[in-house]
Amino acid sequence: MPVRFDKIYDVVVAGGGNAALCAAITAARAGRSVIVLEGAPAFYRGGNTRHTRNLRCAHDGTAPTMTGPYDPAEFLDDLYRVTGGETDKALAQLTIERSQELIPWMNKAGVLFQPPLGGTLSLGKTNAFFLGGGRGMLNALYRQAEALGVVCLSDAPVTALAIENGFFTSATIQYEGLPHQVRGRTFVAAAGGFEANIDWLRQHWGAAADNFLIRGTPYNRGDVLKMLLAHGVKPVGDPTQMHCVGIDARAPKFDGGIATRLDSVVFGIMVNRAAQRFYDEGEETWPKRYAIWGRLIAQQSEQIGYSIVDSKSIHMFMPSIFPAVQASTIGELAGKLQLDAAALEKTVADFNAAVRPGTFDHTVLDDCRTEGLAIPKSHWARKIDAPPYYAYPLRPGITFTYLGVRVNEESRMVLNNGKTSGNMFAAGEIMAGNVLGKAYLAGIGMTIGAVFGRIAGERAAKNARN
Amino acid sequence: MPATDLPRSAALVEADRLMTICNACRYCEGLCAVFPAMEMRRTFADGDLNYLANLCHQCGACYSDCQYSRPHEFNVNVPAALATLRNDSYAQYAWPRALAPAFARNGLFIALTAAASVAAFIVGFVAWRDPAVLFARHAGDFYKVMPHNAMVILFGAVFVFAIAALTLSLRAYWRDINGEGDGRAVVEATGDAARLTYLGGGGGGCTSENERPSAQRRVFHHFTFYGFLLCFAATSVATIYHYGFGWHAPYALTSLPVLLGIAGGLGLLIGPAGLFVLAQRRDAILTDAPRRGMDTAFLAMLFLVSLTGFALMALRDTGAMGLLLALHLGVVLALFLSLPYGKFVHGLYRYLALVKYAREKRTAAFVD
């Protein structure tokens, strides 16, 4: 549907990912006129949604692609456990309650699901996998939205919001080289966090931020979030925190997505620029082990680490996108990594000497561990002694930030003065901090986006009629 | 010199680059057989890549779903890369080697073959009989223009040659991909080929234009494939009639060979026409664009075989029969001659890839 800048839309949606589309489709089905303003060019539309692959949902076990059932109470336990209670309980319960509607709702919108991917069978009970991944899902949602008459603009970043006492009247966008006013009766902010905004990250992380890799597109700048906070919307979530994993240091600066992950860490040792180990590589099982290393590496000199394994382990983890650095001796490997050879040889020798005999099994917390090291390796410790030796360089890969806007059960924004906004709603990563105060649970970002996207769409539709 | 000493072709290098990226991503695993087959490997030898290329049905779903397609710097385009490699592989396995270049400019090769073949029949009819026979009325009796035995000898020889050339090409392919199969795999592959299981993008359909998947390509391919089989059945039944029962052509409109031929012929008009229209609308980025002439040439030949067949049937009692017979036989002969050197081979290579896949799916382990 062609865009018209002379009309007043019932619902103006900022953002173009899962949450934005769920809100747009819901409002359009209720008969409202809707415009979606995506800041990124068409290929990059959808923010982090384009890199996702599944959503977590409570279900009774009848979903054809899932092993199940996943009881809402169990889901809630999982959420409380990972966040350590840093969650708004009412909103957490609402998320889980309504997550049960998501698969049928997505199916109706044309989204197809598939059984869990290879290597992720552990998620088969809790997570529904999109056929073809997040971009396939997003394409289906866009087709549905367009079929319902939603105006979907891409490459249309919001540059300003007109908000009076918490009441939205219009958004200014830059579109096809010109600024335009988009007026609306209600506003849904679904424009994500600020993980790609290096300047913003630098405020909290200093120069280290320059060495971070951003796993999503460069368009996740948090502009809308910043405008809302400046207009007196109440913040939620730790402004300094981000979700950050260890990824291949050779990945692109932006948008490397899932393919740049490395699962090698637990199979060997991890060293820093000084060729010293800095954390227990055998502390936890997947997926937590996957999530801690970004932060650990961020705290090392030059924000880089090196995962070192030998030929016993090189085929035990997911294939990597970039080849491992390979050498026939530890000294040669150090040379290729530009590390101090003597220091790396000593680190490996000390580690090897500390390894106790055990029965190796990387699928459980096995009994292979070290003894006598200042930094132990408590599981999966095997000597690194079978050449050739391999190394992968890792850097922190930033996935999302926790800072967002406070909302209530209607997805309605809460203002600093304690009142709620007359016509502004938020959904997705921009308000995920209400539910997910810290840490992460695989697929829950999509759950929060879809649940609150739908709620925001319902409420905005109702609001726009009054 | 072993093939490993040669520098890899650009198509192999690109396919290897993409499969390495895809194997670290794996989001497309549910779309078709290519990605699960890829996941059974960590590295990709030439034979592996040729196998994956021929396993790809080019539905395009993995391109529109890809987070790394252009303008992303990874520039992932699996349908086009595998189409290019697949077309290279047809030439690589071609027997005799001297005819491998036929795949490079396939449209021209097929057109010249067809023209020469039609001309040869016209000249032949005139030279062996007399010019009058070409334009006379024969009440539908083709053998007055060309004796039955001459037809059998000519087409039989060409058919035997085509079978031999295809067999040798397929043998080279099967060796290259380390082919393995068994009865169960053959049954499963036959089912997957008959239904075109993997032309469905995992359920969403084939991406023909825009990013809107549809079942149209599968439907028109079914028309083409089953039309071809019905025409083959018509010829086979007629052969049995001739030699088994001494019932000679022309056959009545309600006879089995003619009914099968009509049904098959309709398939070969509707199917290739539909596939041609869809190919014109299809985003060229999903294809091996420089060699799309090969697809067009094969569709045109199938369409012409059917069209000239129907024309012959309609006008067999008129003075046009002689020329139409030359036209029809010329096109059919050219189709047979070019079977090992055109798009026809895709079905055989893909079928064997499906056999290998069905077998290794049961026996090999996924890498993760």
Image (cartoon, coloured by chain):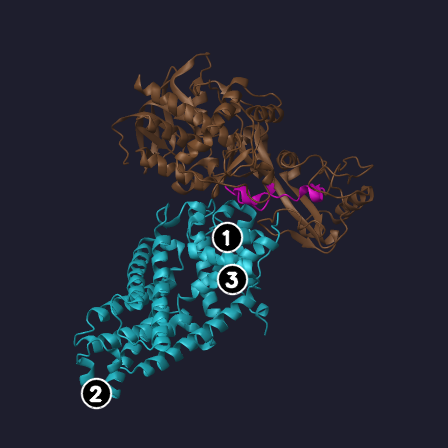
Chain colours: A brown, B cyan
- In the displayed structure, A306 sits above or below A222; it is below
Tell me which residue sits at (53%, 50%) in the image: B22
Q: What range of the chain is rendered magenta?
A: A247-274
The kind of residue tagged 3 is Asn
Tell whether B73 sits left or right of A146. right
The kind of residue tagged 1 is Ala
* Residue with the mark numbered 1: B33
- In the displayed structure, A230 sits above or below B103; it is above
Q: Is residue A264 magenta?
A: yes
Mark 2 Cα shell of 10 Å, populated few (<14), some (14-19), many (≥20): few
Tell me which residue sits at (58%, 41%) in the image: A120
**Disc number placed over residue B247 in the picture, else none:** none
Q: CA distance from mark 1 to mark 2?
A: 57 Å
Q: Nearer the viewer, residue B145 or B336?
A: B145
Q: CA distance from mark 3 to mark 2?
A: 52 Å
* Residue with the mark numbered 3: B50
Q: Which quarter of the picture shows residue A343?
A: top right
* Residue with the mark numbered 2: B130
The kind of residue tagged 2 is Asp
Q: CA distance from mark 3 to mark 1?
A: 14 Å
